[in-house]
């Protein structure tokens, strides 16, 4: 389970929707606390959005 | 005509039932899609480095084979733990000479009657058994001559092999992704297979499908030689493996590069062979896979003497369910669903419906009828209804309407399918080479032609005799060009 969670936040979509925004923020500020907060918000939004996308895809494909 | 027309309401119900059954049997693919979006099976670093034979079947591949052997020699894996074997199959160029110069053991085969890759591999394994004994290597890799391996490829595959996996496939990237739209459709197809099949099946401990090259298997599979000589030897091997209860797993971290056709003529030829081989595999292996779903491993065609583990009752039940589902999954993959749908359409929507309209006429049919998004959009914009009195004109109009609705559905599906290409470009952004946006857009819009070609080659393959012909490989790209792959 740990490995799956790690994959969810580090691979595939995460390289575009987590890594790139986080790297952008790191370029704009050196404040470690701010970086931590923004990273948390990005990961939270990513989790919510992609869970919704996954549910929607299943809904469409299964014609529920 | 009247009798056929009277059958129309029942025919409609039968057609709907068949459609529902077909939808149900592919329902599990939705879960594969979602699982593949985020997850794949990972392997711990191996405790032991195993010994491998690397098998390459080559026919007039002097332009590319040297680069493949170079990429193998650049692996971060002990050289004494692998040996490269090449079968120069009916070659009229310097393939054998170049392979030997690069350090491969090369056997030359001349048999113009038995020409498939499977026959070449069969010859090669006979030679390996005679000169080395098949058991002297713990596993065998199969590559095409145009492949290139990332420097950690064998190490990563060894990680999976060391964990007990007997048949492992790997990440198939493309050397010439952006050469033109033809190569890009193939490139996207392999990535689609990874994202929608291999990753999920691997995590669920099922059996994904081998795709011709870039795979590793245990020596027990060739203990009695290589038996798969059809047009698509990979499909036959997959079906046999599944029937015997083998898992076919996928190692996402082992990446290799392949050259795709750039000519439409060559691509059509290859697709026709795939379609024919696919149908052959369905005919040969379908019945056994179907029996396996209900009777487990009671009836198996081939026996590689798989060592059965001593499992508890609970584990045995789980293994039985796993095996039966893997058989079902592989059977569904082999089933020519496109052809079944074509027959359904011809019988119910064309023949029976035309007879119905001949007898009853056409009463208020919307020109843009259908559930696809395009039909809904056009219906919302234009309200055009068709009326026609019974008779011969209504029969021909019924025929035209059936064809028109099919075209409308296909156009709508074509545009929907482009979203899959967008998804693949985003989710595999880290691994796909840098391509300009205009080219990406072109490839997104040409991508759905891959499945269209597959559909029509399937129809043609039913009736046309297909023989194996080599695909020319011209790419001068080396592994250094791709990733500076040095130790």
Image (spheres, rainbow, N blue to C red):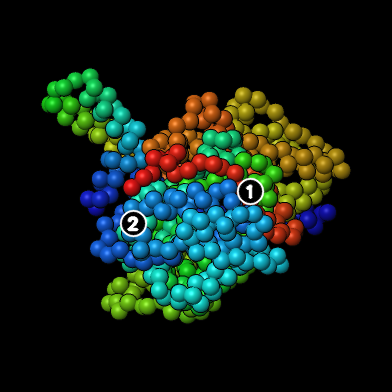
In the figure, residue B310 lies in which quadrant? Answer: bottom left
- Which residue lies at the image location 45% right of the left edge and 35% below the top edge? B433
**Which of the two residues, B441 or B405, is positioned nearer the viewer here?**
B441
Residue B356: give x, y in percent of width and height. 77, 48
Q: Which mark is residue B472?
A: 1
Q: Earlier in the sequence, mark 1 or mark 2?
A: 2
Between the residue at mark 1 and the residue at mark 2, the CA separation in whole angstroms equals 30 Å
Residue B287: give x, y in percent of width and height. 58, 71
**Which of the two residues, B345 or B427, is positioned nearer the viewer here?**
B427
Q: Is residue B389 left or right of residue B429?
A: right
Q: Which mark is residue B77?
A: 2
Q: Residues within 10 Å of mark 2 (few under 14, many from 20)?
A: many
Q: Residues within 10 Å of mark 1 (few under 14, many from 20)?
A: some
Secondary structure under badge 2?
A: loop
| B473 w.r.t. B51: above or below | above
**Which of the two residues, B302 or B403, is positioned nearer the viewer here?**
B302
Q: Which mark is residue B5?
A: none
The chain letter under disc 2 is B
Residue B300: give x, y in percent of width and height. 51, 77
The chain letter under disc 1 is B
- Which residue lies at the image location 26% right of the left edge and 27% below the top edge? A23
Q: Is residue A19 left or right of residue B408?
A: left
Number of numbered tags placed on the structure image: 2
- Which residue lies at the image location 48% right of the left edge and 55% below the top edge? B102
């Amino acid at each position: 389970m740990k490995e799956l969670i790690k994959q969810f936040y580090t691979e595939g979509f995460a390289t575009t929707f987590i890594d790139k925004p986080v790297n952008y923020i790191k370029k704009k500020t050196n404040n470690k606390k701010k970086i931590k907060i923004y990273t948390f918000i990005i990961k939270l939004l990513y989790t919510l959005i992609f869970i919704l996308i996954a549910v929607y895809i299943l809904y469409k494909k299964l014609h529920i | 005509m009247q009798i056929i027309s009277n059958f129309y309401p029942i025919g409609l119900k039968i057609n709907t039932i068949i459609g529902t059954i077909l939808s149900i049997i592919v329902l599990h693919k939705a879960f594969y899609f979602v699982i593949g979006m985020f997850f794949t099976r990972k392997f711990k670093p191996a405790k032991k480095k195993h010994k491998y034979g690397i098998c390459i079947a080559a026919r007039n591949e002097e332009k590319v084979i040297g680069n493949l052997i170079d990429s193998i020699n650049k692996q971060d894996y002990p050289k004494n733990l692998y040996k490269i074997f090449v079968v120069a199959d009916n070659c009229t160029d310097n393939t054998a000479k170049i392979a030997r110069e690069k350090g491969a053991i090369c056997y030359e085969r001349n048999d113009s009657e038995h020409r498939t890759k499977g026959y070449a591999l069969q010859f090669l394994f006979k030679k390996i058994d005679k000169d080395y004994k098949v058991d002297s290597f713990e596993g065998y890799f199969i590559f095409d001559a145009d492949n290139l391996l990332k420097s950690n490829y064998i190490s990563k595959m060894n990680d999976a092999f060391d964990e007990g996996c007997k048949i492992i496939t790997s990440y198939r990237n493309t050397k010439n992704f952006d050469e033109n739209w033809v190569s890009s459709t193939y490139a996207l197809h392999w990535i689609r297979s990874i994202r929608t099949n291999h990753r999920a099946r691997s995590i669920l401990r099922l059996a994904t499908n081998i795709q011709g090259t870039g795979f590793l298997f245990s020596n027990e599979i060739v203990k009695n030689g290589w038996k798969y000589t059809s047009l698509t030897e990979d499909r036959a091997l997959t079906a046999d493996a599944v029937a015997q209860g083998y898992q076919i797993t996928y190692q996402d971290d082992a990446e290799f590069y392949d050259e795709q056709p750039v000519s439409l003529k060559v691509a059509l030829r290859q697709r026709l062979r795939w379609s024919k081989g696919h149908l052959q595999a369905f005919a040969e292996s379908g019945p056994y896979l179907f029996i396996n779903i209900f009777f487990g491993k009671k009836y198996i065609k081939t026996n590689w003497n798989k060592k059965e583990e001593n499992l508890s009752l609970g584990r045995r039940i789980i293994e039985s369910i796993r095996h039966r589902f893997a058989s079902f999954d592989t059977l569904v993959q082999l089933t020519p669903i496109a052809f079944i749908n074509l027959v359904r359409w011809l019988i119910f929507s064309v023949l029976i419906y035309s007879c119905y309209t001949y007898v009853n006429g056409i009463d208020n049919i919307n020109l843009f009828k259908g559930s696809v998004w395009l039909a809904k959009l056009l219906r919302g914009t234009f309200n055009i209804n068709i009326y026609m009195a019974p008779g011969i004109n209504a029969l021909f109009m019924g025929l035209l309407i059936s064809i028109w609705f099919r075209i409308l559905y296909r156009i709508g599906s074509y545009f929907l399918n482009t979203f899959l290409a967008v998804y693949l470009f985003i989710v595999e952004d880290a691994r796909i080479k840098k391509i300009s946006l205009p080219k990406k857009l072109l490839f997104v819009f040409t991508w759905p032609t891959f499945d269209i070609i597959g559909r029509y080659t399937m129809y043609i393959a039913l009736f046309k005799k297909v023989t194996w012909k080599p695909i020319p490989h011209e790419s001068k790209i080396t592994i250094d060009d791709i990733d500076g792959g040095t130790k």
